[in-house]
Amino acid sequence: MPAGDAFTPDQLYDIERAVRYAEETSGLHFSVYVGGADSETRPFAIELLNELDDPDRTVLVYVDPAGRRLEIVIGELAKRQLSDSSAGLAALTMQTSFATGDLTGGLVTGVQQLGTHAHQPPMLHANDEAHKL
Amino acid sequence: MIVELSGHSLLVFVGIPVLVIAVLTLLVFASSIANGPRYRPGLSWWAPPVWINGPTATKPDPANLPELPELTASTQAPGATATATGVARTLGGASASW
C-alpha cells in the first residue's frame, strides 16, 4: 500500500453508511478503527474502546492491516444484545474479505452483520397494564 | 539500402501503434487509478490510522477523577478488564487473523 489515505472518500462513505445502519438497527454505538497497534492488538483495541464516549454500549471493530489482525470488542451492556458467537461469525466474514485485499467490503459487510445480529425486535404491548404481571 | 520514411508513413507505422498502446495501458490501469491504492495482504501498510465514529468530546483526565478502591483477584470476574478508572468491565468480542 503506497503512502496516502487508507480509504478513498467513496470507501469512507460506504463504511460510515454501514456504521449508521448498524447503529440504527441495533441502538448500539459502533466504531471502526483501521491502523497499527502500539502493543498487542486486543489490549490496544480495549484501550480504544475506553476512549469512546459510551464504551459500555459500543461495539469497536479494530483492524490492523499490517499485522493482519482483527479484533471486535463489545462493551459490557452491548454484550447483552450481541453475543460472542455472533461477533465470531462477523469476524469470519471480515476475515475472508480482508484475505483477498478487500478492506472496505469486509468492513461494510461485517459491520452490517454485527448490527443485524444485535437487532432486538421491539416488545409489543410491553407497557400495557393488561399485560403486566 | 536506406529507406526514407515520409511523414505519412511515420504516422501510420509509429503514431498509430503508440496510440493503441497508450489507450490499452490507460484501460488496464483505469480501474486502479479510479479506486485508489489497494490493500495487499502481506505488504506493508503506511497509511495513517483511520477512526470512523471515534470519540467526539474530550474525556475527563483520569488523574483528576476521585480514587477508587483497587481491584483484587477475588473481586475481578473472569475475563474482566481493568479500565483506566479502576472499574472492572466484562467485555465480549472476537478475534481473527488472515
Image (spheres, coloured by chain):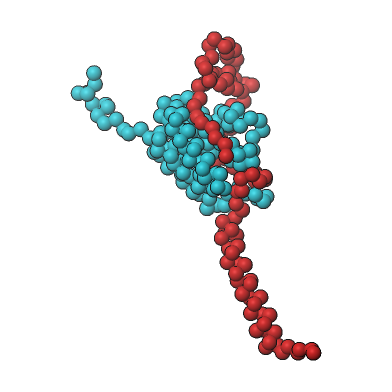
Write down the colour of chain A.
cyan
The percent coordinates of residue A72 (x first, y second) are 52, 33
Q: Nearer the viewer, residue A68 or A109?
A: A68
Q: Is residue B9 above or below residue A14?
A: below
Dividing the picture into quadrants, the one containing residue B64 is top right
Q: Residue lying furthest top in this view?
A: B74
Q: Quadrant of residue A63?
A: top right
Residue toward you, A101 or B35: A101
Image: B34 above or below A31: below
Against A41, is B28 above or below? below
Q: Residue at x 54, y 35 (%)?
A: B96
The number of numbered discs placed on residues in the rendered structure image is 0
Q: Taking A127 as reference, is B24 left or right? A: right
Chain letter matching colour red: B
- Which residue is found at the position 52% from the left and 17% from the top? B78
Q: Residue at x 61, y 53 (%)?
A: B37
Q: Position of residue B94 (x, y in %)?
A: 51, 31
Q: Nearer the viewer, residue A17 or B59?
A: A17
Front one among A53 and A35: A35
State the residue at coordinates (60%, 48%): B39
Q: Which of the 4 quarters of the picture holds residue B44?
A: top right
Q: Quadrant of the N terminus of chain B?
A: bottom right
Can you see residue B28?
Answer: yes
